[in-house]
């Protein structure tokens, strides 16, 4: 049985690169694509209700995640199994929680490349995951 590699994904180019990297480096291993539905999106995303918690925003977020998995799965070119999972919460914490609850051997995550004040104010999910992860983490630029 191959190793299980977790790849947190969003719609960023960096996430797509992480999927490509993991599928080429971890050929034959099992890839787990994880998307985190962030509750704050329900407030800030006009497609999900803007400032109101529009009825159905969560269902729309999950539907969007399934579409994202289709897009990301097209980037995978290897012999191992590819599974998907959706969870909610703050991205870094949700990823760490997922690691604690599942048998994962490594994380491959895209870096958004934030620097300076933006990084200080917003933080970096990949950096937080790398610091808190119980398993090795590869950050793909």
Image (cartoon, rainbow, N blue to C red):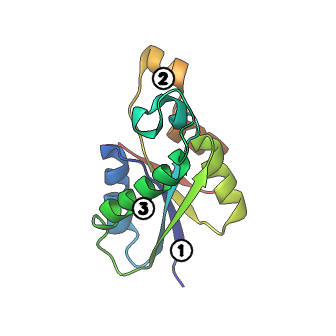
Q: Which mark is residue 119?
A: 2
Q: Residue 114 at x, y = what percent?
A: 41, 27
Q: Does 96 sit left or right of 55 as displayed?
A: right
Q: Residues within 10 Å of mark 2 (few under 14, many from 20)?
A: few
- C-alpha distance separating marks 1 and 3: 24 Å
From the viewer's side, name the closer residue of 75 and 131. Answer: 75
Q: Does 129 sit left or right of 141 as displayed?
A: right
Q: Residues within 10 Å of mark 1 (few under 14, many from 20)?
A: some
SS under mark 3: helix
Q: Residue 117 at x, y = what percent?
A: 46, 14
Sequence-first disc among 2 and 3: 3
Q: Residue at x 52, y 24 (%)?
A: 122
Q: Residue at x 44, y 33 (%)?
A: 45
Circle 2 or circle 3, nearest the eye: 3
Residue bearing the label numbered 1:
3
The image shows residue 113, relative to residue 126, as above or below, that is: above
Q: Residue 5 at x, y = what percent?
A: 51, 65
- C-alpha distance separating marks 2 and 3: 29 Å
From the viewer's side, name the closer residue of 134 and 92. Answer: 92
Q: Residue at x 47, y 30 (%)?
A: 50
The image shows residue 109, relative to residue 50, as above or below, that is: below
The image shows residue 34, relative to residue 61, as above or below, that is: below
Name the residue furthest front.
Answer: 55
Q: Residue 63 at x, y = what percent?
A: 44, 57
Q: Residues within 10 Å of mark 3 (few under 14, many from 20)?
A: some
Q: Which mark is residue 66?
A: 3
């Amino acid at each position: 049985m191959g190793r299980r590699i977790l790849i947190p994904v969003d719609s960023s180019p960096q996430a797509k690169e992480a999927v490509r990297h993991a599928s080429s480096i971890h050929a034959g291993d099992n890839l787990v694509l994880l998307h985190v539905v962030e509750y704050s999106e329900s407030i800030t995303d006009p497609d999900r209700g803007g400032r109101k918690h529009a009825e159905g925003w969560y269902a729309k977020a999950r539907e969007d995640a399934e579409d994202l998995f289709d897009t990301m799965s097209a980037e995978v070119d290897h012999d191992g199994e590819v599974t998907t999972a959706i969870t909610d919460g703050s991205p870094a914490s949700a990823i760490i929680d997922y690691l604690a609850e599942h048998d994962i051997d490594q994380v491959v995550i895209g870096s958004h490349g934030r620097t300076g004040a933006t990084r200080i104010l917003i933080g970096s999910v990949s950096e937080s995951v790398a610091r808190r992860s119980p398993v090795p983490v590869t950050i793909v630029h």
